[in-house]
Image (tube, rainbow, N blue to C red):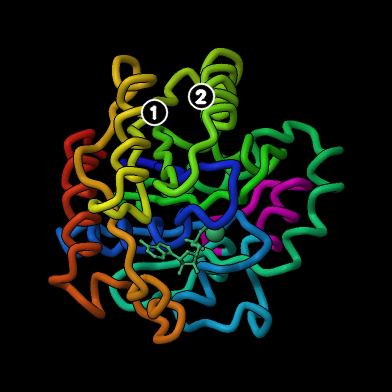
Amino acid sequence: MSAVINLLNLKGGVGKTVSSINIAYSLAECGNKVLIADTDAQGNIATSMGVNGNELSITLADILSEAIDKDVSIKRITEAVISVGKVDILPSNSMLAGLDFKLMNAFGRETILKSITDKLRDTYDYIIIDCPPSLGLMVINALVASDYTLIPVEAHYLCFESLKIMLDTINMVKLKLNPKLEVAGIFLTMYQSRTSLSKGIKEMVNRTYGNSVKVFDDSIPYSVKAAEQTLYGKSIIELYPKHPISTAYKNISKELMKYGK
Ligand SMILES: Nc1ncnc2c1ncn2[C@@H]1O[C@H](COP(=O)(O)OP(=O)(O)O)[C@@H](O)[C@H]1O
Ligand SMILES: [Mg+2]
């Protein structure tokens, strides 16, 4: 059995995709078999891993579309899976955006992604779901398919309102649709330890949510190296294994492994 973990934040550009990839690679380096499922129509998982999403003949969008109408076999699902070094990806591209309407009118519309990821649980130790920056049906599907939610929060700009909306949504999904769902924790991204802004935001998150939700001690430092991932199509863990970004992602992943599979 595997653990399914989604990375969620309603804001774009906070480091969901970079975190999904580097946590996946950290887990894989510890001997786990890991899949990243991209539920964002921007298709950044493929792009960041050096795969041209627009040249893919089959993506998660096709599999989701088929799963709306019928039971999709594991053989068919794996046709969309690509191996990128130590991890596998279930990529997306802009085709996913066109699926919203079909999903909206589907029977069991909140459980379509779950019907796919559940079939992959025996194959993988961890399935990481990279979420889009919105609270649409795709995010609800990701929450219903998951055991845990991880929330990356940007240390430059804190939106308590959106954190509250996210935690309320997670609770609502837990209550109505997926009683197994837990918040694995919040971690800070783009953290600049010398600035009082970063420190202040971490303190505020700890003060406001620390009693009810785990706030990871490790924060992901701000570094232009993070952007090089897209340039070279490789995770930061592989490009710069000793970089403080890699160390922080490895530490967070080790903590995640305590939650088990
Ligand atoms: N730790 C970091 N330091 C500096 N830049 C980062 C860091 N993490 C991510 N970035 C950059 O921020 C941008 C948004 O990151 P991304 O992971 O795509 O966010 P999201 O998936 O939440 O939209 C990208 O250009 C990425 O290279
Ligand atoms: Mg993203």
Q: Are marks 1 and 2 in contact (CB under 8 Å)?
A: yes
Which x, y percent locates residue 164?
A: 54, 23
Q: Residue at x 56, y 19 (%)?
A: 168
Residue 213 in which image quadrant: top left
Residue 233 in which image quadrant: bottom left
In which quadrant will I find the N terminus? top left
**Is residue 63 toward the left or the right of residue 17 in the image?**
right
Residue 183 marker: 1
Give the number of the mark in front: 1 or 2. Answer: 2
Type of the residue with mark 1: Val
Predominant secondary structure, magenta span: helix
For disc 1, the neighbor class at 10 Å (few under 14, some 14 to 19, many from 20) is some
Disc 2: which residue: 167
Type of the residue with mark 2: Leu
Which x, y percent locates residue 199?
A: 29, 40
**Is residue 174 toward the left or the right of residue 68 in the image?**
left
Q: State which region is magenta.
A: 61-75
At mark 1, the secondary structure is strand
Which x, y percent locates residue 132?
A: 61, 51
Which x, y percent locates residue 2?
A: 33, 43
